[in-house]
Image (spheres, helix red, strand yellow):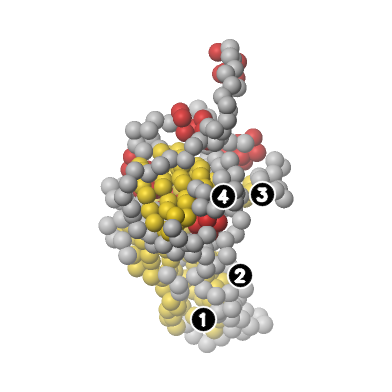
Amino acid sequence: ALGGRRGGEPMEPPLPGEEEEEVTNVVPEKAAMLLEPLPMSFAHLEKAVKLYAAHGGVEDGQPLSIDALPVVEEPVAPVAKGDALSSNPSVAAGGAATTSSGGLSADAEVVDAAAAVYAIPELGELGRVFRSCAPVELTESETEYVVKCVKHILDGHVVLQFDVTNTIAEQQLVDVSMKVENSEPELYDEILSIKCDKLVYGVQGSCFVVLARNPEAPISHASFNCELEFRVVEVDPDTGDIEGDEDGFEENYPVETLDLNTADYMAKVSLGDFRRAWETTPNDCDVEEKFALQQFKKLEDAVENVIEFLGMQPCDGSDKVQHAKKGAPHPLYLSGKFVGNVPVLVRAMLQLDSSQMILRICVRSQDEAVSRMVADCIR
């Protein structure tokens, strides 16, 4: 938990450039139409179009539009395990190589993290993957069975891809599946489990669990107790030939608990010029809150962890804290897209007031339920 909710009217930070003198430029109407900014860079647009074509988008007979393109997220630096709020940085469902400055390189190869989902007919029928999260390690790397999970987010489902590696040369694993126990049965319902037929020594294989999400329930944190189930068949480590009973024996292997958070449904993307996006988005669905972040005593720590917990993209360099004056408030601007392709903007102000970190936040989207779910990430 970040901290308790506090009363009082939240104070919005000024928009980027708001303190600067405004200069009025008269632009002809036709020229203004041509100068309408893209909501993404050309590099991101190229990757999105390639992913769109790769998954049959050009064959569905529908006109190509920005909203129809898959999300390509901003590159994210790995977060060290054990950070206060998150050890699960997000990656794009259509990731790609980055430049030395952290941006997406124009000639980077598209790496589709959801390729394994589309390769299985039963999963491909669920629709397009909105985004894929970075792999979460559910075991230590030195254990006999190494397990990690990729959470694939779709509009109405979540596909859990469990990647398993058998590190015991004398064993072959058969009919490998993952049993999950869900802490939020009103939100998620397991509808499908797909086994990995065989796992030989040193070769990674995958099994899948599909969760149907209740669209009437607000998205919130859920945890899953996970246990690997399989049969062990003994083999000759040199030849791989089966030794003894071909049916082997049944085995269960508990792994770490898997968390599914609201931030997993948020794509870390820029929506273009923040000030323009904020001013052109109606404020009817705004949600404003004020929180006391009890565990943070430094602005840098609070800013970093709020960004990670919301799973959004910082804008206009607002993730960098400038120490102009002790106790001065720090504005934070964030953008992203929530599942369903809903653009979301956040204006926040963090301030260390009498040894207490105060967060004032305003979430703006065109869906009040989405704004509320995002604000409730701070709990």
Disc 1 from disc 2: Cα separation: 16 Å
Q: Secondary structure at mark 1?
A: strand
At numbered mark 4, what does the secondary structure look like: helix, strand or loop? Answer: loop
Counting residues from the start of the chain, the first of labels 1 and 3 encountered is: 3
- Marks 1/3: CA–CA distance: 46 Å
Rendered image: mark on residue 325: 4
Marks 3, 2: nearer the viewer: 3
Residue topped by disc 1: 233
Give residue 102's mark: 3
Q: Which mark lies nearer to you, 1 or 2?
A: 2
Residue receiving disc 2: 203
Instruction: Determine crowd level at label 2: few under 14, some 14-19, many 20+ residues with C-alpha closer than 10 A.
Output: few
- Callout 3 secondary element: loop
Q: Residues within 10 Å of mark 1 (few under 14, many from 20)?
A: many
* Residue 308 in the image, given as x and y percentages of width and height: 50, 55
Residue 205, located in which quarter of the rendered image? Answer: bottom right
Mark in front: 4 vs 3: 4
Q: Distance of mark 2 from mark 4, alpha carbons?
A: 56 Å
Mark 3 and mark 1 in contact (Cβ < 8 Å)?
Answer: no
**Picture residue at 58% right of the left edge, 41% below the top:** 316
Q: Foreground mark, 1 or 3?
A: 3
Q: Using the rendered view, name the quadrant where residue 355 is placed.
A: bottom left
